[in-house]
Amino acid sequence: MTQDAATDGLQVFIVGGAVRDALLGLPPGDHDWVVVGATPEDMSRRGFIPVGGDFPVFLHPRTKEEYALARTERKSGRGYKGFTFYTGADVTLEEDLRRRDLTVNAIARKPDGGLVDPLGGEADVRARIFRHVGDAFEEDPVRILRLGRFAARFADFSVAPETLALCRRMVEAGEADALVAERVWKELSRGLMAQKPSRMLNILNESGALARVMPELQGVDEVSADVDRAADVSLSLPGRYALLCRLTPEREALGRRMRVPSECNDYARLLPEVLAGLDASQQGADPIDAQLALMERADALRKPERFFDLLKTASLLKPVDSAAWQARVDAVRGVDAGAIAKACAGDPGRIKDSVRQARLDRLRAG
């Protein structure tokens, strides 16, 4: 760790995930820095750019990495926004570390490379245990979501029994009810894209939080296995979300509750139709008509990439011949709808049926 003109003379420490990941031998990600003994005015004079809202956070003038003033926090209301912060120059590094969520995230690295680890985080990294820092954990319900997300990312870590018990008490006290949709989706989407998404669902379920933040979700045990297989094949987030709620009749209500992005909602809506269409195209009275009907419902001609991603998603649940479907889409897209429309100029009402018949003929021709 080297200093520069902007930080020369400041007490700066790398904290949190970067330290944890380095101890795990993982590639370094973004660095989070804590500055001890400084004021906002000190930072501004050095050229740092203020970006914090509730508490002072600054961007380095050159690297644009985040530097936060050491702070303490005190609960002042329900939910994750109910806090007041103190960032005086007298706040120590140890006090800042004690307000963090898990011991493995409450380790700092000094400029000389040594660790500041007042809570035993390094030992918990070695033991692969997620353990809450202290009673302050229960003041922020987002930490339940983060615990689940970390469990999904680090599949070889266990959760300390006392930490899971604390999460249950938080839910029983109503803290999870204060979580806002955007934050739930942010953490859930990151957990779905992790190594073992089922572990996040398990943590939320065992703590009771799942029923509070996603009460519509059904078939959790079955879809947990689905999303893990999706992670194994690097499926897209929309595909993973569609698998998550494929057994949920109220998937539209679930999407509204969490303000899920429209693409994810589209996949969730279309996946059951794709699964049904695949069955009909193999076992129906007219498989060719069923194949075209599926492509029409899934808008495969205008959005082929989405269609094939949906097929990849469906392939985790039943056999899918992707090469055959590629040939079918190519065949249907090869029909010149414009020429047919021109030929039907005298009878516009025939255009739609004529185009569809031409597509069926192309499919039947193989």
Image: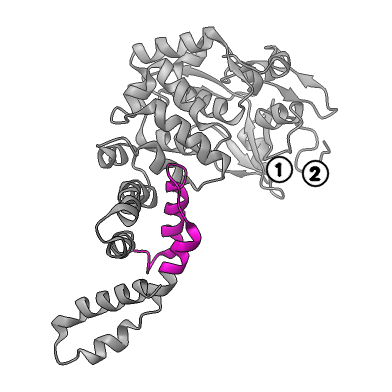
Q: Position of residue 247 (x, y in %)?
A: 32, 35
Q: What residue is at 37 percent from the left and 17 percent from the top?
A: 208
Q: Position of residue 360 (x, y in %)?
A: 30, 72
Residue 345 found in image quarter: bottom left
Q: Identify residue for label 2.
A: 5
Quarter of the image with the N terminus is top right
Which residues fall within the magenta stretch?
A: 299-328
Q: Position of residue 263 (x, y in %)?
A: 38, 52
> Relative to residue 101, is residue 186 depicted above or below?
below
Callout 1 amino acid: Arg
Q: Is residue 245 magenta?
A: no
| Classed neighbour count for the residue bearing mark 2: other residues with Cα under 10 Å, few (<14), some (14–19), many (≥20) | few
The reply to whether discs 2 and 1 touch (Cβ–Cβ < 8 Å) is yes
Instruction: Judge whether residue 91 can be spotted in this image.
Output: no
Which disc is residue 46 wearing? Answer: 1
Residue 295 found in image quarter: bottom left
Q: What residue is at 61 percent from the left and 40 percent from the top?
A: 58
Q: How many marks?
A: 2
Instruction: Judge whether residue 248 can be spotted in this image.
Output: yes
